[in-house]
Amino acid sequence: MTIRTEPSFRESVDLMYNRAVKLMDLPPGLEEKIRVCNATYTVRFGVRLRGSMHTFTGYRSVHSEHMEPVKGGIRYATGVNQDEVEALAALMTYKCALVEAPFGGSKGGLCIDPREYEEHELELITRRFAYELAKRDLINPSQNVPAPDMGTGEREMAWIADQYARMNTTDINAKACVTGKPLNAGGISGRVEATGRGVQYALREFFRYEEDKAAAGLAGKLDGKRIIVQGLGNVGYHAAKFLSEEDGARITGIIERDGGLFSVDGLDVEAVRNWIVKHGGVSGYPDAQFVEDGSQLLEEECEILIPAALEGVINLSNAERVKAPLIIEAANGPVTAGADEILRKKGCVIIPDMYANAGGVTVSYFEWVKNLSHIRFGRMQRRQEEARHQLVIDELQRLDDVMGDTWSMSPDFKDKYLKGAGELELVRSGLDDTMRAAYQSMREVWHSRDDVTDLRTAAYLVSIDKVAKSYHAKGL
Ligand code: NAD
């Protein structure tokens, strides 16, 4: 398969799917059934703003209902279109299967540049969009549960949740109609950071295996590795922050809409983020070299490249010049099918989107469970756990007392051991476990089959197999 012209995003996803499914032995017809998008709803609605009627176009696509509810974010961007929403919905199906989140795949989008509207205008638009989707059960705790994506966040999710609750006043599970809500509106600790945190856990897991690092020509730890990040939004910011602050990696490049920043010594992620919030972009930031055509930094020397903005940024026009030996797809679809082929031939290892950014949907799953159970994680067991730990500490203290100078507890052991896990600790633990288990399932296929030479194909094999099995279980 040699791809010379750039396919659309959805075609790109299909090409990658086809490449994997050829290596499988699915019952006749099932291959196509899994690939196709079940339905895409297009809505055009009007909102009266600034003295006149404005018409907006939105989509909600349902790729697969092999499990319900279906799940997937809602994106606000001017480039939103049916092809994109369908590609993203398909990726959601494979992603949920891979990380064993019990959902089918869906995605939504609204063609809008949110920066052009005041907050109260965005609220009116979001509520109206939510109304249009909810009345068709395209927002519903048991059928279709959106989440944040590019251009949306906690604020929009809170409006959507409230809109649904107003329309379904007796639904005791109304809060579970959407995830990514703020904590005070039924959200869960750790959801905002979840996708970036998942990228960190994914890299940590990758770096645990000598064989996998060697495949990318890398060795050693994350400590000191040079990383270039594209997009310092929710996902890119958290990934860059955690990797630099907790793992010692050096963020040498940050690419934003208005250009890129470069510093061999490493950028201060928090300072850059604050600069963006204040000035609307990276230009003018004092402690780094400014590169006007930010996308050139995608081709800069580094050990790890993290595209965390939008799809198709590594394509036929620049793939040959990308030097990073390891790419982790924090965004959805940042590498086109053609670029994927070029990079694979060059020996570049790509940790695929359906795995790399699955932290978001994983913690969304926890939030949905929390909403349905109507209780915060850890509420019942935390103090009981602390009391049991206290018993151990008391015994150790007795030992400490009799041993004199020959033995004593390490200084911070007591505090650390005594603290029972709260919701945030439990969420992080569940996320870490999920990212590790999913990585292991991919790498097992990657290393055990001669016909599987990359992680993306391995990821597809694992997830398609799971989707196929649930079709089988349904008798289809
Ligand atoms: P976001 O809106 O918070 O951030 C996107 C960032 O990218 C912004 O800082 C924006 O300025 C920047 N950007 C936009 N166009 C750019 C360009 N041409 N060049 C450089 N930078 C550009 O969005 P997000 O939620 O962080 O999502 C980013 C990606 O991650 C998307 O592909 C999304 O589908 C994917 N994703 C997000 C989540 C989530 O939980 N938010 C979960 C899974 C996947």
Image: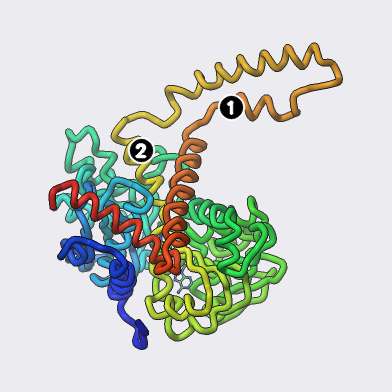
Q: Is residue 117 left or right of residue 145?
A: right
Ligand 1 is found in the corner quadrant, namely bottom left
**423 w.r.t. 192: above or below:** above
Residue depicted at 46% across the width and 52% down the height: 440
**134 w.r.t. 290: above or below:** above
**216 w.r.t. 156: above or below:** below
In this view of the protein, which residue sits in the foreground, 410 or 228?
Answer: 410
Q: Compare marks 1 and 2 and give the one earlier in the sequence.
A: 2
Q: How dense is the environment of label 2, judged by Cα within 10 Å: few (below 14), some, or many (20 and up)?
A: many
Quarter where residue 273 is shown: bottom right
Tag 1, which secondary structure?
loop
Amino acid found under the numbered disc labelled 1: Lys
Residue 79 in sight in this render: no
Q: How dense is the environment of label 1, judged by Cα within 10 Å: few (below 14), some, or many (20 and up)?
A: some
- Which residue does the numbered mark 2 point to in the structure image? 186
In the rendered image, residue 417, in percent from the top left (x then y), is placed at 62, 27
- Which residue does the numbered mark 1 point to in the structure image? 419
Amino acid found under the numbered disc labelled 2: Gly
Residue depicted at 39% across the width and 47% down the height: 362
In the rendered image, residue 345, in percent from the top left (x then y), is placed at 48, 79
What is the distance, in whole Å, between disc 1 and disc 2 at their CAs?
25 Å
